Image (spheres, rainbow, N blue to C red):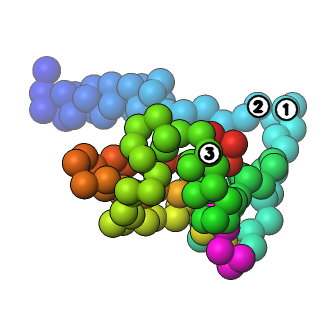
Amino acid sequence: MNRTSWVIGLALLFVLLAGCSAPSGPSPNVSVQTTVVPTTGGGISDITTGIAPQTTTLSDALRDLAANDVPQMMNVSEIKVHQLNGIGVNDKGEAQMWVLGAYNGISTTLLIYTEGE
């Protein structure tokens, strides 16, 4: 065989393999529907739904902690709060969770309060 036959043979082999591995499009009898999602400026959008989280004021949280949890761990009159963090604080001064770093002269305790707990 001469050189031209080899080139034509390789070209036909390439065309055959390329045709077998190419992605196929939709058949002419099938209709394709596209869904267009409207954009509103792009970026990240909020997808959360449901009930707004319950919030409480710091004074209510301290009252509940003094009435329920703190007396079991330490004397309420000796507590000194050294750190206070509100998580999810709104413009009314209410938070989803209050975290207090308390010290009673002997030990340090981390007190965490969420609505009703």
Query: What residue is shown at x 81% (from left), y 49% (from top)?
Result: 51
Q: Nearer the viewer, residue 67 or 53?
A: 67
- The residue carrying mark 3 is 67
Considering the numbered disc 3 on the image, is that residue within a helix, a strand or a loop?
Answer: helix
Q: Residue furthest top?
A: 1
Residue 31 picture location, percent across and down: 86, 38
Residue 97 picture location, percent across and down: 57, 54
Query: What residue is shown at x 64% (from left), y 49% (from top)?
Result: 64
Q: Nearer the viewer, mark 3 or mark 2?
A: 3
Between discs 3 and 1, the one toward the N terminus: 1
Between discs 3 and 2, the one toward the N terminus: 2
* Main secondary structure of the magenta stretch: loop
> What is the CA distance from the residue labelled 3 to the residue labelled 2?
73 Å
Which quarter of the rendered picture does the C terminus lie within?
A: top right
Q: State the image quarter where residue 15 is shown.
A: top left
Residue 20 picture location, percent across and down: 47, 24
> What is the CA distance from the residue labelled 3 to the residue labelled 1?
70 Å
- The residue carrying mark 1 is 30
User: Which residues, given as a range, are shown in magenta?
Assistant: 91-95
